[in-house]
Image: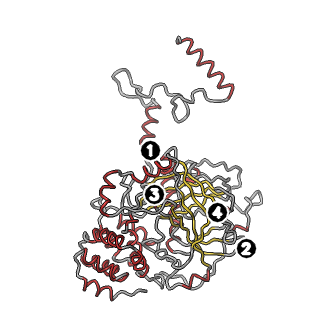
Amino acid sequence: MSKAANRLLQSLVAATCVALGVSSHAADMTRDNGSLVGDNQNSQTAGPNGPALLQDSQLIEKLQRFDRERIPERVVHARGTGAFGEFVPTTDISDLTKAEVFTPGTKTPVFVRFSTVMGYRGSPEQARDPRGFAIKFYTAQGNWDLVGINWPIFFIRDAIKFPDFVHANKPSAVTGVQDPNLAFDFFAHTPEATNMLTHLYTDEGMPDSYRHMDGFGVHAFKLVNAQGQVHYVKFHFRSEQGVHGIRPQNIPGSIGADWNLMTNDLYGALKAGNDPKWDLYVQVLTPEDLGKFDFDALDDTKIWTGVPERKIGTLTLNRVPDNYFETTEESAFAPSRMVPGIEPSEDRMLQGRLFSYADTQMYRLGANFNDLPINRPRVPVVNNNQDGAMNSGDRKGEVNYEPSTLGEIPQDPRYKYVQTPLAGTTQQAAIHKTLNFRQAGEYYRTLSEQEKEDLVTALSSDLSRVTNDTNKYTMLSYFFKADTDYGARLAKATHADLSRVRSLADKLAEN
């Protein structure tokens, strides 16, 4: 085709597109304002040998956008993998909650983000680390974020300790390398972490796949039914694929073979049509039940022993995201994002997370992070929040306040928070029933002989690197207090004086 004929054809196409109200250059390169790019390989210059020109908007915009491709990395959970799916309830629990996500016959779209906790973006996915298991439910009542991990418990019970916990377990502020001396210096002064550490150093502390691990909400939450009745619950997503971990002797080969093992495994399964599933179970307590334990039932370092689980639904992942950054990286989870029928408990760790998670997302993504497609609710958002960077909302009118006689936004009193009885005075004090060690021992005694050996092998490897003698023996006394066989094996593996360990353990109070 001649150049003249080609120009004529382009003119006809352009005219047709204008008449139809569509773009004639959908497949052609454009700048961010939609204008066509004529040359993306050569800058404008002042003559053949002169400097580049500031008026070259493609050059300037291209460099500006490149310079800003990185947003602040998550402080924790930076290394993540996301997938889309759906949640289907299987049991009517209207006796527990008015949340419509649990209404039989509904299907709720979800986005799930798995992650490691302490590693940076690009770090190996195989690490001795809890795994994030965060779920965004796009419900008919708004978004509900359940932000959990692959264990039912956590290291600390008060959010005021969280920055210190992370600092001690992140790379050293001097060397940039993680150091067990720093981690166990913190844990030696945090006896409530004994239970979580015991779980973490088992084979399941190194999952071989995101598909082969369970997910937990960790904290107690309140479910509120249509009559205003309250129940406390814990959420457990049980993997239909089973739970599998990597034994200590197999870890070096696993990491060396594939730093991206868990992402490749999940996406490989999804692309092959092998959609992973998790069944959702809940444990349920009445408010009166909370005081019946010899530990604090709202302490997130504890499991609700003896409380049966009830299956209420199934989560299925079925699609790999089309764009990593726009989904996995820009997704923003916050436990404060709840829907009517689901409310927070008084768990001290959860109470801090309610603020901190949403706040860190505002820092990373801006005040309007909920406007991003991956975070946007599937229902209209109507409120008086306005402006801020990257605001793409559609609020109209002058009345951006209340009360007002000119036009207020209607509110339904049925959706007020439930009333919770309070007693006592303001305080700054630890909980009374700490019971720091017993559940760690109970868990240890459920392990097979091989699992016990692997736990001791993995944990002693890090404890042997602790050069502070006081911290080392303090940690050994915690594990000995949990179970004498457990502590004795660790003492032998770390070449410690067992009589000194036993003496320190004898001084520890269980409560």
Tell me the element at label 3: helix
56 relative to 405, above or below: above
Q: Position of residue 444 (x, y in %)?
A: 39, 76
For marks 2 and 4, the one nearer the N-term is: 4
| Corner quadrant of residue 500 | bottom left
Q: Secondary structure at mark 4?
A: loop
Label 3 sits on residue? 210
Name which residue lies at 70% across and 52% down.
398
* First in sequence: mark 3 vs mark 2: 3
Which is more foreground, mark 1 or mark 2? 2
Q: Are dots 1 and 2 in contact, CB under 8 Å?
A: no
Whether 110 is drawn above or below 149: the answer is above
Mark 1, Cα crowd under 10 Å, few <14 / some 14-19 / many 20+, is few
Between 54 and 278, the one nearer to me in the picture? 278
**Residue extending farthest right:** 405
Amino acid type at circle 2 is: Gln
User: Of marks 4 and 3, which one's residue comes earlier in the chain?
Assistant: 4
Where does label 1 land, which residue? 69
Q: What residue is rendered at 59% in x and 54% in y?
A: 86
Q: Residues within 10 Å of mark 2 (few under 14, many from 20)?
A: few
Task: Please state which amino acid type lies under the numbered disc 1.
Answer: Glu
Which of disc 3 and disc 1 is earlier in sequence?
1
CA gap, disc 4 and disc 3 = 23 Å
Q: Which residue is mark 4?
A: 90
